[in-house]
Amino acid sequence: MIEVKVLGSGCKNCQTTQKLIGDVTSENGVEISLEKIEDMAEIMSYGIMSTPGVIVDGKIVHVGGIPDKRSILSWFKSDCCPADDQCC
Amino acid sequence: MFEQLADFIVFEVSGMQAGTPVAQSLHFFVMDITKIFFMLVLVIYLMGLFRSFVSAEKVRNYVQGRAEWVARSLAILLGAVTPFCSCSSVPLFIGFVEAGIPLGVTFSFLIASPMINEIAVVMLFGIVGWKITVLYILSGMVVAFAGGIIIQKFKPERWVEDYVWKIHMGEAQTLEQDNSLKARHRYALTEVKTIVGRIWKWVLLGVGAGALFHGYFPQEWASNLGDANNFLAVPLAVIMGVPLYSNAVGVIPLAEAMLLKGVAIGTTLAFMMSIAAISVPELIILRKVIKWQALALFTAIVTLSIILVGWFFNSIL
């Protein structure tokens, strides 16, 4: 199970990001646990200032704005198809 | 190019008579819509590419530890080119505080950012021409610069919520991001899709309203507004504009109609700035990090600076 956190104060962009990640991963059969972090101190502890931010397994993969689908898939690449570049 | 297109659609395809109010409105609408959407797509794309190189975290690093006037100028320039979602105000504010950047500089950034944004600039440029666009950008920068300095004089640090001082930002990890040109291109395209998808209704509505004014604005109103070009017009426009909230996009066609019917440039610019610069939602978000005294001060100072800028333009133009 991959741990994914969406960091954001609950604005529209953050909600969209969270939903997008959920949709893209379930479409591609990637199992994740998706969590929303709204606590400002915790958000800041990752050193980011523009929300939404996305953390995958403890690593910052995205900051500020809504990510596009290709980028989302690229975070999970090794888990859905390690060898093939085309499948995601 | 866009004028010919509008000529073609309105006069040749639909066969309307030039000079009637309907034709005038429709012509204006078609011309502006095509022109504005073309420019929006282009500019949002270019800004998206540019923005893939600049982030709030980088802005903070540039501004941190500089002499105050340098820091302020940088903050305003960066605020002008990096629109950020108002929901980012809080982390941004905390991040700036934590980096030891003076609050006055942070406020300069917070004033400049919503006021000067690429969408407003495109709309202004498309509808009222480059001269007023340049004036608008300059006056936005002046208000941000002066506003931040004056706020600093009141020592706003005492109003910052206690918990803000206690938050410790983690070391910014290096972002494992795809930095190829292709990824930046994708980012810019996503920006175009998201932003145009979000604002197209408002652009249509705004230009539509402007077009109606173009054909149908009663002359009597115009003379009333013309009479209103006295000393009080600017503060009145600003006081009307402050509680109104719009992301500058919706208000520009209205501004055009005002200009067209003889409202002075300073009054119109002041009205636009007051709508864009201060918004109740943003104040409510900022209330999480700073007490209402500071927000009241912020509102008062920005309002006053906008009024002064309006008077200034009215007196020189």
Image: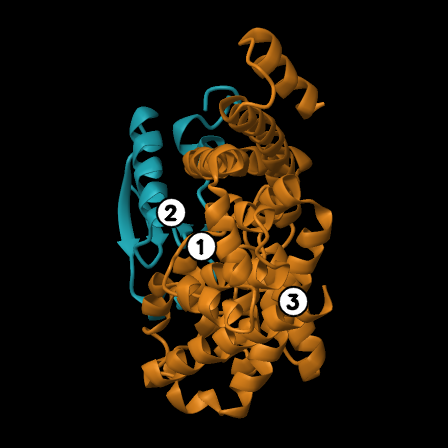
Question: Which type of secondary structure does the marked residue at label 2 adopt?
Answer: helix
Task: Look at the numbered discs 1 and 2 and tell me whether their residues touch, using CB distance below 8 Å.
Answer: yes
The answer to which quarter of the image holds residue A43 is bottom left
| Mark in front: 2 vs 3 | 3
* Chain holding disc 2: A
Rounded to the nearest angstrom, the CA distance separating label 2 from label 3 is 40 Å
Q: Residue at x 44, y 32 (%)?
A: A69
Residue A86's place in the image compared with B127, above or below, is above
The answer to which quarter of the image holds residue B24 is top right
Give the quadrant of the N terminus of chain B: top right
- Determine crowd level at label 2: few under 14, some 14-19, many 20+ residues with C-alpha closer than 10 A: some
* Chain holding disc 1: B
The answer to which quarter of the image holds residue B112 is bottom right
Residue A68's place in the image compared with B57, above or below, is above
Rounded to the nearest angstrom, the CA distance separating label 3 from label 1 is 33 Å
Q: Residue at x 57, y 24 (%)?
A: B27
Chain B pictured colour: orange
**How many numbered marks are there?**
3
Asked whether the viewer can see residue B97, the reply is: yes
Badges 1 and 2, same chain: no
**Foreground pick, A18 / B307:** B307
